[in-house]
Amino acid sequence: QESENEDVADMLNRIGDEYEQVSSRNGKFFFPKYANYGAQAGPQPYSNAIEEFDFIVVGSGSAGATLATRLSENPKWRVLLLEVGKEPSAITDIPALAASFQLTDYNWGYLMEKQDNIGLGMVDQRMAWPRGRVLGGTSVINYMIHVRGNRGDYKRWKALGNPGWGYEDVLPYFKKLEDYSVAYADAGYRNRGGPIGVQDVSYRSDSVHIFINAAQEAGLKYIDYNGRGSLGVSYVQASTRRGRRCSVENTYLRNARGRPNLVISTLSRVTNLILDGTTVVGVQYIKNRQYHTAKAKKEVILSAGTFNSPQILMLSGIGPKTHLEELGIPVVRDLPVGETLYDHLTFLGLLFKSNDTITINYSDLENPRSFISLVSNGTGPLTSLGGVEALAYIQTNVSREKDKYPDVELIFLGGGFHMDKGALYAKTFRITPKIYDALWKPLEDEQVWTILPMLLHPKSKGNLKLKSKNPYHWPKLFGNSFNDPENLDMKTFIASIREVQRIARTPTFQKFGTEQVKTPIPGCEHLVFDTDEYWSCALMHITGSLHHQVGTCKMGPANDKTAVVDSNLKVYGINRLRVADCSVIPVTLSAHTNIPAIMVGEKAADLIKDEWTEAEGRSNFDPRRNIKDA
Ligand SMILES: Cc1cc2nc3c(=O)[nH]c(=O)nc-3n(C[C@H](O)[C@H](O)[C@H](O)COP(=O)(O)OP(=O)(O)OC[C@H]3O[C@@H](n4cnc5c(N)ncnc54)[C@H](O)[C@@H]3O)c2cc1C
């Protein structure tokens, strides 16, 4: 089911789908025709009052909630935050349950389009591309791995022609957002007192200590990967406080909610921008099956995420001309929206057995005492980030970088998909029952740990297109993975598998009888295990996404034909419109993307405050004060 509410979708389809200019008491607006059908049954075109705000932020995820919180620090500005999802529940704060929220309606449930050389071991050959649809967005359903990325990532970002986005520019925001308490920290790069807690995970299996020692024995340095450099190994750092999730909802937003100038509207789906020529004057959204209009005196900022910000732009006539014309959407501005999409892929089948009891004991999670430890002192098995215990950043021998720069992240799990007997983890990755039964089922009672190698800088580039002009239809998401002309993505994966094998062969691991699981993956049995050909086949079957898609509203200078926004996050050729979320990130990052998205939200707030405070004339109000409560 590609539309999450067929009822409304059908109704919208019945109404017809021409676009037209609509006059209202507030002037002439550009609406899809189906927005203006007051005589028919169903949603009405307007709620009674058209409310007016200074700023409208669309989407309350990692970037949007951060931005709305910071903008509403100015009591003179009225800010509207629109979110299609509902409120999260206290259960989402429990780190060990992270994976389970993907199977709830807190997840949009997007799927990558079928491709013939990847996802062969996944249901319908389609990879899961989950996204949070809840107040707080994906920060409410993610795994809470706290990573900023490598200095070199931001060097590349700036070098593409984006002043203000180099490492020295963004570091103050990474510091501002955090409140760290990890034991091993590169103190000059860290900060206390920000909204997002950063902790070590209190619960660790024996296997993670062994991994950390073995990785060092194999030559990796122990590091604070959020410090000056990120090549090396470390216990995972978690976006938690007292062992519980720090989302942007329960940190930034929850403290800002009492402000009379911040209006938060959940269950509100923005369908399109309202344009007066090429100036954005507001948005149209559906709430309670009724159309509403909100006007923005200053700006609209799209923070609907990598899939939905480009969707809203295109539904509003801002996007690739030919594509919009194919769908019958009148073109307001021809821009390469959706034409860049990078993702982080991971190989799911690198499993190692031990003859000693060293891995996570899954039944600890179900023990009532674990719940008591979490509630009473924020410790215990339930603080585990869904089994993620350590990270290592490596540069494989096929990397073409001259500088020291990681090309793969190794994610250490002190367990694996076998732990829940196929009930959850394998399902979230859409592994077919045939593959689960062959590879993981025989391991259900064994001591098994897993390494997920994550390709940091894929050479393949995907894209996003609209399926139709119906706002309830999912956009089409093309990963286009493993399609780089030199096959470097596949080669880097294979090189990383060799590195992991080297770590597993260290005396430290061998003391525990460590042995790679050699069960052939169904579909690859005809190949000799552990040859490059075997791993290529395995990669085509069980490589999954780690959900770090970026780039669909790419930032770049005016002469960059792939750019949608400039370095101030402004959409080219359109007035009073910015995008602030992962979609603007123009490069692959050596990071998971929650913390970079919050950084984008923080920086967007300062860009906007600077511009409008200047315009309004400076007053005693200091828009950059670092409020204590948020
Ligand atoms: C399962 C999973 C695990 C992850 N684990 C980690 C991790 O451990 N560490 C990490 O750093 N990153 C992780 N990530 C990635 C990271 O969480 C996301 O990249 C980041 O949160 C995205 O932030 P964003 O602001 O771009 O968008 P989002 O946080 O996705 O926010 C977009 C918001 O806009 C809303 N929206 C969309 N369309 C509309 C509309 N039309 N009208 C109104 N509202 C709308 C959405 O419902 C959503 O709330 C994970 C992602 C997933 C899916």
Image (cartoon, rainbow, N blue to C red):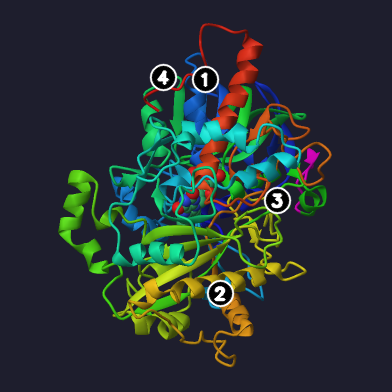
Give the mark, 4 or 3, whose residue is nearer the N terminus: 4
Which class describes the residues within 10 Å of circle 1: few (<14), some (14-19), or many (20+)? some
Give the mark, 1 or 3, whose residue is nearer the N terminus: 3
Does the numbered disc 4 mark a residue whose Cβ is under 8 Å from ligand 1?
no
Mark 1 sits on what residue? 624
For marks 2 and 3, give the CA distance: 35 Å
Magenta stretch in the rendered image: 327-335
Q: Position of residue 427 (x, y in %)?
A: 43, 69
Q: Nearer the viewer, mark 1 or mark 2?
A: 2
Residue in view at x 33 percent, y 52 percent? 95
Give the mark, 2 or 3, whose residue is nearer the N terminus: 3
For marks 1 and 2, give the CA distance: 48 Å
As shown in the figure, which amino acid type bears the numbered disc 1? Arg
334 left or right of 553 in image: right
Which class describes the residues within 10 Å of circle 4: few (<14), some (14-19), or many (20+)? few
As shown in the figure, which amino acid type bears the numbered disc 3? Gly
Which class describes the residues within 10 Å of circle 3: few (<14), some (14-19), or many (20+)? many
Mark 4 sits on what residue? 260
